[in-house]
Structure formats: C-alpha cells, structure tokens
Image (cartoon, rainbow, N blue to C red):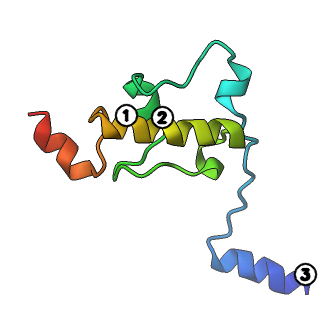
Amino acid sequence: MGEEQEERFQGRGGRHYIARPKFCQFCSDKTQEIDYKNVELLKRFITEEGKIRPRRQTGTCAKHQRALATEIKRSRHIALLPFVAGTWQKNNR
C-alpha cells in the first residue's frame, strides 16, 4: 500500500506541498479597518474577474471575511469597484 501511494504522488509530478499557515491580517493588525472607501485594500481580496476570494485563499477569519464581503458589495453599489472585470477597464480610460 505504501508503494501505491508513492506512485500516485509521482503521477502528479512527484511534488509534495506543505501549506504555510495562513493568518487573518485584520486580527493581527488591529489598526487596519475594513472600509468600503479603501479600494486598494479591497482589490487584494477580489480576483481579476471581480469575484470575492474565498477564505482558504486569503487566510482571513470568518468574522473579517463576512465584513470584507459586505464592504466589497457596498463599494460595488457606489461604483468604486466593478461587478465584472471588463467594465472596470472600459470606464476608466
């Protein structure tokens, strides 16, 4: 059984990945607040397509992920962030 596992890993490229522990940057830095007007901060938490990144990618805790999603949605409604990626580049020429 051990040999089968080794072969299986070799079939995927033979690489072993050890994920580094992620931490919530808002919990560690108490001075940084999540605000819908801080577009540069919010851009780090959305993909190029305009989707909100999940917790497993960003490392934020559940409390701050909910707050991030709320603030991103607020900034979208007042047109500070795009709903879709293509419209953002066309409007800012």
Mark 1 vs mark 3: in front: 1
Element under disc 2: helix
In percent of width and height, residue 8 lies at 73, 81
Q: Is residue 53 above or below residue 79?
A: below
Mark 1 vs 3, N-terminal side: 3
Element under disc 3: helix
Q: What's under tag 2, amino acid-wise?
A: Glu
Q: CA distance from mark 1 to mark 2?
A: 6 Å
Q: Dot 1 surroundings within 10 Å: few (below 14), some, or many (20 or more)?
A: some
Q: CA distance from mark 1 to mark 3?
A: 52 Å
| Outermost residue to the left | 93
Residue in the picture at 80% in, 77% down: 6
Dividing the image into 4 quarters, which one contains the N terminus? bottom right
Do the residues under discs 1 and 3 have CB atoms within 8 angstroms?
no
Q: Which residue is mark 2?
A: 71
Q: What's under tag 3, amino acid-wise?
A: Gly
In percent of width and height, residue 49 lies at 34, 53
Specify whether residue 63 is in view: yes
Mark 2 vs 3, N-terminal side: 3
Q: Dot 2 surroundings within 10 Å: few (below 14), some, or many (20 or more)?
A: some
Q: Is residue 80 above or below residue 85?
A: above
Dividing the image into 4 quarters, which one contains the C terminus? top left
Question: Where is residue 38, by image quadrant?
Answer: top left
Q: Dot 3 surroundings within 10 Å: few (below 14), some, or many (20 or more)?
A: few
Left or right side of 62 for 2 = right
**Label drawn at residue 75:** 1
**Label drawn at residue 2:** 3
In percent of width and height, residue 11 lies at 65, 80
Do the residues under discs 1 and 2 have CB atoms within 8 angstroms?
yes
Left or right side of 72 for 55 = right
